[in-house]
Each structure stands twice: as structure tokens, then as C-alpha cells.
Image (spheres, rainbow, N blue to C red):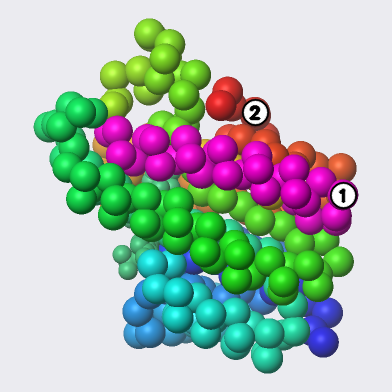
Amino acid sequence: MSIKKIALITGANKGIGLETARQLGKQGITVLTGARDETKSSQAAEKLRKEGVDAHGIVIDVNDAASIQKAAARIESDYGRLDILVNNAGVMLDDEKKKPSEQSLEVWRKTFETNLFGLIATTQAMLPLLRKSAAGRIVNLSSILGSIHFHATPGSPVYDNKVAAYNVSKSAVNAFTVQLAYELKDTPMKVNAAHPGWVKTEMGGEGATMEIADGAKTSVALATIGADGPNGGFLHMGETLPW
Ligand SMILES: NC(=O)c1ccc[n+]([C@@H]2O[C@H](COP(=O)([O-])OP(=O)(O)OC[C@H]3O[C@@H](n4cnc5c(N)ncnc54)[C@H](OP(=O)(O)O)[C@@H]3O)[C@@H](O)[C@H]2O)c1
């Protein structure tokens, strides 16, 4: 069995996911760059290998149960365990011109399919492998936009940003994180929700305030927290956010 830690990052072909894989890899962790497209997953790994990272592409479409199972089977046969799961894959599909009541049900369903059900399905498939780690870590990519407290508080940083399907999917990710943290509380495992910041990626857009290198920091920190770190938290750069 490898003595190096093994990390799986979903949606690691670009954006915060690729950068998270890079930063974990630079710490000497073997990274599996998950992408729903075979070419994209291997290109991401190749890019990181050229930077000295032990990276390997892996196909994982979080909306496809067969692809999730195949990824888990490969990790089992190649490594026998998983130390870190970063549930990073996510979509924002809302029509920003529409009010919360006007977003189509199709948008709600597709958003939840990836951001919530895909995250749960991946977690369920990887949990047996994480249980074989000495200290499994799960990071769920949430968002400050998932904070119900901030959405209900006039004047908060996100009060006027009602991209409803996305926001509610991330509130649900937070709620799931708390449920799972309860289940894991008497094990060496930890699960936390991360707000990366408003980051200059395809999703974050040009107007975002954070560079990608900084946007990966919260995920990396939560993926590598020690035994004294939080379980069931919602954090950004070491600060706890309100639910
Ligand atoms: N950027 C921000 O400001 C910000 C703020 C708060 C939270 N977040 C969260 O951070 C995470 C990463 O966001 P990002 O900004 O890096 O976005 P991004 O650049 O749009 O990247 C999203 C990643 O998710 C992948 N993905 C989407 N659907 C998938 C599926 N069904 N299976 C597997 N992978 C899938 C994409 O793959 P393809 O290339 O194949 O589409 C891509 O690799 C997301 O969960 C997002 O909600 C971002």
C-alpha cells in the first residue's frame, strides 16, 4: 500500500478543482484529477506531472452512477484506500434575469442533480475507501451563497444575489455536511463545507475578486486538517461562516 496520501478531486480539469489538485500535489499527495471527460482528466494530470506532481487522470461524472462506481473500483484496485475526497464539481445554471419563483424546474433539477445528488453519490461510493484511511477527509464545495442566514439578512454580502437554484443547492450541501459529520463523529474522519471565495474561474467570471491560487486555499486547508480540526463546519480561509 502507498504511504503517500491519495486524494480524489472531482471537477479537477479546470478552475478551483485543478488548482486544488495542484496545491495538494505540491504537498507530496498523490492526486487523482477527476473529470467527466477522459481526455480532460488525463490532460489535467499531464499538466500537473510536468510541474512535478504525482497526478493521475480518472473519469468521474458525478451524474453517472456507473462512472462513479468505476472510479471507486479503480481507486480500490490501484491504492486500496482513499485519504481525501474533494467534492468540487459544481454547476450554476440559473437564468440570472429570473426571480427565484421563475427559475424553471428543469434548472432546479439539473442543478441539484450535480451539486447535491452527485456529491452525495460520490461520497457514498468513496466512503468505504475513506474508512480504510488513517484519517479520511471530505471537503464539500459549498458557497457563501448557500448561507440561509446571509440571504435572510438585509445588507449582508449576498442579500441581493438570489440565483435561487444554485443558492439552495449549496444550502442543501451544507445541510448534508452536518448530517454526515454526525455520522462520522466517532471515527477519525472529518467532513467540512468550504466557501472558496469569489474566484476568477469560468463560473466566478472576470469580475471575481480572488485569484484561482487563493480560491483553492480553503479546500486544501480542509483536506489536510489535523485531528484537532473541525468536523461539520462551514469555513472560508479558516473563518467559520453562518449557516
Ligand atoms: N468560482 C467561484 O467564485 C465559486 C464560489 C463559490 C463556490 N464555488 C464552487 O467551487 C466549485 C468549483 O467551481 P469553479 O469556480 O472552479 O467552477 P468551474 O471553473 O466552472 O469548474 C467546475 C468544474 O466542475 C465540473 N463538473 C460540472 N459538472 C460535472 C459533473 N456532472 N461531473 C463531474 N464534473 C463536473 C466541470 O467539468 P467540465 O469542464 O466538464 O464542465 C469543471 O471541472 C463548484 O462547486 C462551485 O460551485 C465557486
Ligand 1 positioned in quadrant = bottom left
Depth order, front residue of 111/159? 111
Q: Residue furthest top?
A: 154
Res. 52 visible in picture: no
Residue 112 at x, y percent in the picture: 37, 50
The correct choice, above or below, for 88 with respect to 155 in the image is: below
Residue ID at (35%, 79%): 37
Which of the 4 quarters of the picture holds residue 99? top left
Q: Is mark 2 within 8 Å of ligand 1?
A: no
**In this figure, which residue is indicated by the disc labeled 1?**
186
Q: Residue furthest bottom?
A: 77
Q: Which element carries disc 2, helix, strand or loop? A: strand
Other residues around mark 2 within 10 Å, as few (<14) / some (14–19) / many (≥20): some
Depth order, front residue of 109/8? 109
Mark sitting on residue 240: 2
Other residues around mark 1 within 10 Å, as few (<14) / some (14–19) / many (≥20): few
- In primary-sequence order, the first of circles 1 and 2 is 1
Residue ID at (66%, 56%): 138
Which of the 4 quarters of the picture holds residue 155? top left
Residue ID at (86%, 66%): 134
Residue 21 at x, y percent in the picture: 55, 66
Depth order, front residue of 207/42? 42
Name which residue type carries label 2.
Thr
Q: Let me know if residue 169 is in the magenta part.
A: yes
Instruction: Magenta stretch: give its range.
Output: 163-190
Which of the 4 quarters of the picture holds residue 187? bottom right
Name the quadrant of the C terminus: top right
